[in-house]
Image (tube, rainbow, N blue to C red):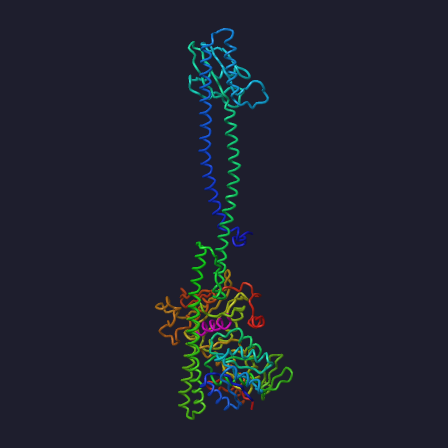
Amino acid sequence: MYSGTAKPPVMRSAAWRITLWATLAFAFGAMIVFIFLHQFVAGDIQRRTDAWLAGEAGVLGDVAARTPKGVLYRRIVGEVAELASREVPHKQGANAGLNDSVFFLQTAADGSMGLWVGAGDAGAHLRAIRKSKIMPDTPSDLGVNGFDTPFRVVSVRMANGSHIYLGLSERDEQRVLRNLRLRFILLWLLIVLIGSAIVFYTTLRMLRHIRKITEAASRIGEEDLSTRVPTTSRNDEIAHLALTLNRMLDRIESTIHQMHTITGALAHDIRSPLTAVRAKLEMSLTAAVRDEESESIVSAIEDMDRLTDFLNKSLDVAEARANALRLNRTAIDLNELLRAMIDLYEPSMSEKGLRVKLNTAGSLKVSADAALLHRMIANLFDNELKHLPVSCTIAISLRAVDDAALLVVEDDGPGFDPEISTHIFERRVKGRNSNGHGLGLAFVDAVVRAHGGTVEASNRPSGGALLAITLPLAENVDSVLSPAMALVSE
Amino acid sequence: MRLLLVEDELEIQTFLQRSLTEAGYQVEAAGDGKTAERLAIESQHDALIVDLGLPDQDGITLILKLRQLGLSTPVLILSARRSVDDRVRGLEQGGDDYLTKPFALAELLARLRNLVKRSSSSTTDGNRLRVLDLELDLLRREASRNGEILNLTPQEFVLLEYLCRNAGRVVTRSMILDQVWGMRIQPDTNVVDVHIYRLRGKVDTAGDRPLIRTLRGVGYVLRDR
């Protein structure tokens, strides 16, 4: 249902692709920057934690070593440890009073529980400490049963062989990092979205300008050469493209204009004397008394008419080659035209012993210049009539192929001379036995091309010539104004 | 018959004036658009012959101006251009005609006669067209000569009808192509002659006085006397 051409232009725009890649690159780059930042922040927090732990553990170790073992020992060391734990911000409101993010634990030399300052059960901490080998003076992570986050623990070995452990929960550190990550991801998403929207909008605008240039350029030449592609006041690549295109169109227009001037002047300057000469010849024809006299005058007139025909076709071919033919397009039924043409040529063909077969699939309308198309088809028939030997058959078929009308004219005659078959559409190329001026097929080719069609000439494998002509079908017959309508609407 | 000839090339103007006078017309000639406009308004003409390439204005502009002034005289347009533009075609549909240069004098005369519609000697009686002993039934698409039905193809009937409607006037090959087949082409081959030849074989059978006459280098005429 959705073919490529049915989608609106914005869906097919290259802006999507450009935006996608730009967004991907930006998102990836931002992510890498964040990972570095995260690593740095996490490392810095840990370094600060470790420094604090080491300092506090040193103080505690000092206090523990100096306090004599007795009744007061537990109280003094316990209070110092509690003071230390108060330095840590305490966010757990549920367990008010005791801060569960810090613990102090002293083990005896045999590893049994000595002193415990902290929230909750000391047993879990002790078991975890016993399980992991904590090196003295080196901070390390300790996972404790019943706590989601591990503790950062530093241990000090006392002179009497006992150990002091000071632990700080990594909960705060992780919360800070989690907040950082969350905020970053939100910001990152926002920036990526806004960034891609901006990229998309700007590329779309830029590309829309290019599309306008393309549309304008495709219109130029089909109808008139005087319009130009839109330009901008900016001095960027697109403006340069538009300017270059316009300069190119200026040159083309002036060339075509020159061509029209030359062919127009040629036509006028040659036609007027030709008209005068022809008139003089005709006058003398009426005055001629003897048959021989009139004979030579008639032959001179015929020569003149051939010259005129040659002039007309040469100019047509030249103009069509330069894409300068003025076409007055109307909708023409090729099927009807072929039938009329066959009707016209059939008697002459059968006089010569030629047969014509027509095979069509019915009405096929093309948008073409009627006069040129008539002359082009007449040329094809003239060509066959002049060059085919007796008792040949000409098979003409017409059918629609995709968006074009395909007209195939084939015969079972001698075919194209292999020597010239590669230059068959060039001017003045003709077979050895041809007596025309060799413009016939060049004219056919020129007219078909001027209408946006193609001509292919070949020899059939079974012998004989084959000409395949395609002409674009009239897309919308209603939109093609008849000349009379055009006159009225002017 | 009064004609106004508008042609700036003096040589062609002189020749046309002389041959048109010889053909029995009264000819006034103008070399530019202004003079032509004045002459056309001052006196009545039966037809205008206008060259498109005038020194002071476009021939089409002149014709359209005259039409706006209420002049309905038929115009024969002479053009040195090969491709006939839309405006000429529009005029052609309004009953005017055009010829491209160079043209045969006979062609010009034939088209001119066709244009001024000098009454043909064929007589029409409802759906019947009569020229001497030739009779065409336009409804049944049947032709008969001396009461004998002629065995014509539909196309031959159209051709004969065209000749009959112009009985006594010369019709050229290009006029036949234009009017009978609706094509403005100049075949390199004698396609029209073969059609006439065949038609003649059916119309002018032995014993009868031949009706279709060939004028060498000019065209054909259906005898009406």
Rendered position, A47 above or below A27: above
Comparing B167 with A131, the one in front is A131
**Could you tell me residue A253's position as x and y percent?**
44, 67
**Residue A363 in the image, given as x and y percentages of width and height:** 55, 67
Q: Which residue is more in the foreground, A470 or A458? A: A470
- Does the magenta-highlighted stretch encompass residue A378? yes
Residue nearest the observer in this picture, A254 or A383: A254
Q: Is residue A391 visible?
A: no
Image coords of residue A232 (percent x, y): 48, 57
Residue drawn at x 65%, y 83% as measured from the top left: B126
Residue stretch rendered in magenta on the structure: A369-382
Where residue A437 appears, as percent x and y from the top left, is 39, 75
State whether the magenta stretch is mostly helix, strand or loop: helix
Is residue A294 shown above or below A176?
below
Residue with the most extreme right position: B126
Residue at the far bottom: name it.
A289
- In this view of the protein, can residue A47 be seen by the observer? yes
* Quadrant location of the C terminus of chain A in the rendered image: bottom right
View extreme (left): residue: A419
